[in-house]
Image (tube, rainbow, N blue to C red):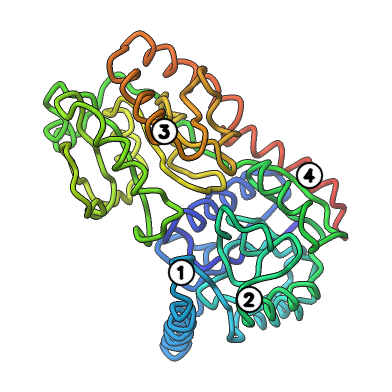
């Protein structure tokens, strides 16, 4: 079976990274050949393609710019993707010999919904956020339930949702159980088979390490304070990511007890009472694994999330996670077993649980062992490979 994965990028952002990992997993299955086509290519992989002519690349950038500009007119800090413009990628899809098309995160004007309607080959959708079941919203406000009935707060979103009614994927794949339930509660894709397959994590890279060889990283972590890791990619002003909640929780803890490690640009603009080590965004997975291993625990403040890579990677490295009980995080964190899952959005309780793990080394060790054990039976590449092999064979694509 020949499969084409369509994604905005192969590495730029969490959804792109996950799409790339799925592509690699598919290629490891006998009798399956997987390729990718992207707008923004960052790897040097030969089986990942982009349309290289300068005119097309400039056109993509212009389309993305105008799409973002229109999205910003709705000033509620809820990221939107309207996918207004048709794409040359459609011609590549329909003129190819692929047996199956796997549509990932196709926003930033990668494909329009009209393009998707015109795909002549069997296709599936791998959901990385809520966009496929909403109008233009990548995630809908956590207190907004109108998406179930296809009712949105602007004409453009309603129009896009109505266009989505006319597309017919043979299957929907979601990495989290929560997102599968969202599809069930909505009114789109009633004929599609719903499949839950988590993201694959290479546990030959992400695993508990007794020794870190990176002297540069070791120098950053030389004092004895507890290291708390937090990473974010993209729009730090997105309220969904809960940076404001984390600051409120951390400011309640004695700053002499810990340091916050941020793998991003310095996004904590509010006044913080605690020390921050900013190590910027890390491209190398091996370096990222080293950083996880040098930290003691990981926190996520998300008001809503799917199955964040940070949590999967850190857990594979044996790190306890503290997060709010929202979205797909219940798939990852088992309360009082491998971390703490906090009732939304109790910043006082969140703070207390951080402080407990800071002070109780024995409990941290217990959670760490459980985290690694749990990750091995949930996210390992070999397990995900078996799941894809089985589910693709069940689709019986001719």
- Gap between marks 4 and 1 measured at Cα: 39 Å
Looking at the image, which residue sits at the far bottom? 55
Of marks 4 and 1, which one's residue comes earlier in the chain? Answer: 1
Residues at discs 4 and 3 in contact (Cβ within 8 Å): no
Q: Nearer the viewer, mark 4 or mark 3?
A: 3
Q: Is residue 87 above or below residue 178?
A: below
The foreground one among 295 and 384 is: 295
Q: Quadrant of the N terminus?
A: bottom right
- Residue 247 visible in the snapshot: yes
Which of label 4 and label 2 is nearer to you? 2
Q: Nearer the viewer, mark 2 or mark 1?
A: 1
Disc 4 versus disc 2: distance between alpha carbons? 32 Å
Query: Which residue is denoted by mark 3 in the rendering?
Result: 314
Left or right: 391, with 176 as reference point = right
Residue at x 34% of width, y 18% of height? 356
The reply to whether the C-beta atoms of the residues labelled 2 and 1 are less than 8 Å apart is no
Closer to the camera, 392 or 34?
392
Callout 3: helix, strand or loop?
Answer: helix
Q: In the drawing, what numbered circle is on residue 391?
A: 4
Residue denoted by label 2:
157
Return the mark for residue 76: 1
- What's the distance in space between the residues labelled 4 and 3, CA to CA? 27 Å
Instruction: Name the residue rendered at 88%, 60% in the picture.
Output: 191
State which mark lies toward you, 4 or 1. 1
Q: Going from the N terminus, do you reach mark 2 or mark 3 first?
A: 2
84, above or below 266, in the image = below
Dividing the picture into quadrants, the one containing residue 135 is bottom right
User: Crowding at label 1, few (<14), some or many (≥20) Cα neighbours within 10 Å?
Assistant: few
- Residue 93 is situated, as x and y percent measured from the top left of the image, at 68, 75
Sequence-first tag of 1 and 3: 1
């Amino acid at each position: 079976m020949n499969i084409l994965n369509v994604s905005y990028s192969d590495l730029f952002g969490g959804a792109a990274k996950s799409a790339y990992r799925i592509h690699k997993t598919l290629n490891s299955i006998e009798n399956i050949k997987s390729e990718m086509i992207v707008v923004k290519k960052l790897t040097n992989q030969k089986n990942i393609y982009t349309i290289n002519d300068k005119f097309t690349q400039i056109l993509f950038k212009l389309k993305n710019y105008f799409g973002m500009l229109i999205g910003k007119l709705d000033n509620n800090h809820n990221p939107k993707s309207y996918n207004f413009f048709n794409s040359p990628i459609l011609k590549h899809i329909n003129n190819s010999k692929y047996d199956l098309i796997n549509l990932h995160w196709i926003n930033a004007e990668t494909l329009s919904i009209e393009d998707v309607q015109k795909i002549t080959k069997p296709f599936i959708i791998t959901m990385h956020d809520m966009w496929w079941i909403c109008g233009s919203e990548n995630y809908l406000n956590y207190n907004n339930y109108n998406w179930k009935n296809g009712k949105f707060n602007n004409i453009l979103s309603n129009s896009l949702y109505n266009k989505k009614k006319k597309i017919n994927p043979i299957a929907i794949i979601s990495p989290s159980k929560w997102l599968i339930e969202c599809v069930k509660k909505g009114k789109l894709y009633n004929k599609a088979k719903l499949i839950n397959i988590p993201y694959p994590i290479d546990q030959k890279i992400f695993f508990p390490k007794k020794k870190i060889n990176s002297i540069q990283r070791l120098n950053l972590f030389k004092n004895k304070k507890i290291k708390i890791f937090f990473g974010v990619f993209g729009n730090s002003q997105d309220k969904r990511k809960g940076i404001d909640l984390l600051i409120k929780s951390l400011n309640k803890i004695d700053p002499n007890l810990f340091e916050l490690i941020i793998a991003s640009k310095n996004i904590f603009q509010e006044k913080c009472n605690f020390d921050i080590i900013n190590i910027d965004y890390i491209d190398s997975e091996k370096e990222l694994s080293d950083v996880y291993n040098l930290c003691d625990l990981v926190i996520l403040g998300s008001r809503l999330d799917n199955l964040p890579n940070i949590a999967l990677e850190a857990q594979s490295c044996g790190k306890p996670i503290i997060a709010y009980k929202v979205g797909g995080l219940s798939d990852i964190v088992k309360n009082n077993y491998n971390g703490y899952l906090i009732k939304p959005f109790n910043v006082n309780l969140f703070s207390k649980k951080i402080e407990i793990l800071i002070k109780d080394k024995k409990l941290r060790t217990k959670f760490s062992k459980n985290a690694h054990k749990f990750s091995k039976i949930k996210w390992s590449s070999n397990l995900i490979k078996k799941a894809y092999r089985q589910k693709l064979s069940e689709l019986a694509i001719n």
